[in-house]
Amino acid sequence: MLADVPLDEEVVLVRMDVDGEDVEALLERGIVPGCKLCPVRHAPAGGPTVYRVDGDLIALRKDLASCLCVQTALAARRSPAEGRKGAARQAPEPAGVVDAT
């Protein structure tokens, strides 16, 4: 989950487990599956974290960042076949889930 990524570690968004207005807000900010994110600063007292998203700075609440599934940039560079050996068929995603694969 994006909320668990340490500061200055770049990750790639794999899946968004959000729906409704949250999806629209994320998409409008350029937060889409496949984009690169990097946490750069935590607000005091549990406030939002600032992330670099493909060059822009965007603040996200922890509850929303916890709904964003990510993987390290290195793992994302592997070919899809390497990460999915034996996974020829996948169950469909539940409603409201956006997947980069």
Image (tube, rainbow, N blue to C red):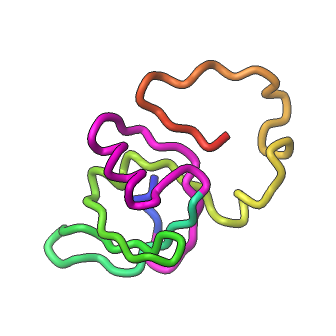
Measured from the top left, where is residue 10 in percent x and y? Answer: 57, 72
Residue 7: % across, % down: 44, 77
Q: Residue furthest front?
A: 28
Residue drawn at point x = 34 percent, y = 35 percent: 19
Between residue 101 and residue 62, name the one nearer to us. Answer: 101
Q: Please provide the residue range marked out in magenta.
A: 6-34
Q: Position of residue 65 (x, y in %)?
A: 36, 55
From the viewer's perspective, is residue 9 above or below residue 96?
below
Q: Position of residue 24 (x, y in %)?
A: 34, 45
* In the image: residue 32, left or right of residue 87: left
Residue at x 45% of width, y 52% of height: 1
Residue 61 sits above or below residue 66 on the image: below
Q: Determine whether, in the image, residue 56 is placed left or right of residue 10.
A: left
| Residue at x 34%, y 80% (from the top left corner) | 41
- Residue in the picture at 46% in, 43% down: 16
**Residue 87 inside the magenta-drawn segment:** no
Find out whether residue 31 is within the magenta segment: yes
* Total marks in image: 0
Image: 43 above or below 72: below
Q: Nearer the viewer, residue 24 or 59?
A: 24
In the picture, the quarter occupied by the C terminus is top right
Residue at the limit of the structure toward the left, as seen here: 45
Q: Would you identify the image quadrant in which residue 20 lies?
A: top left
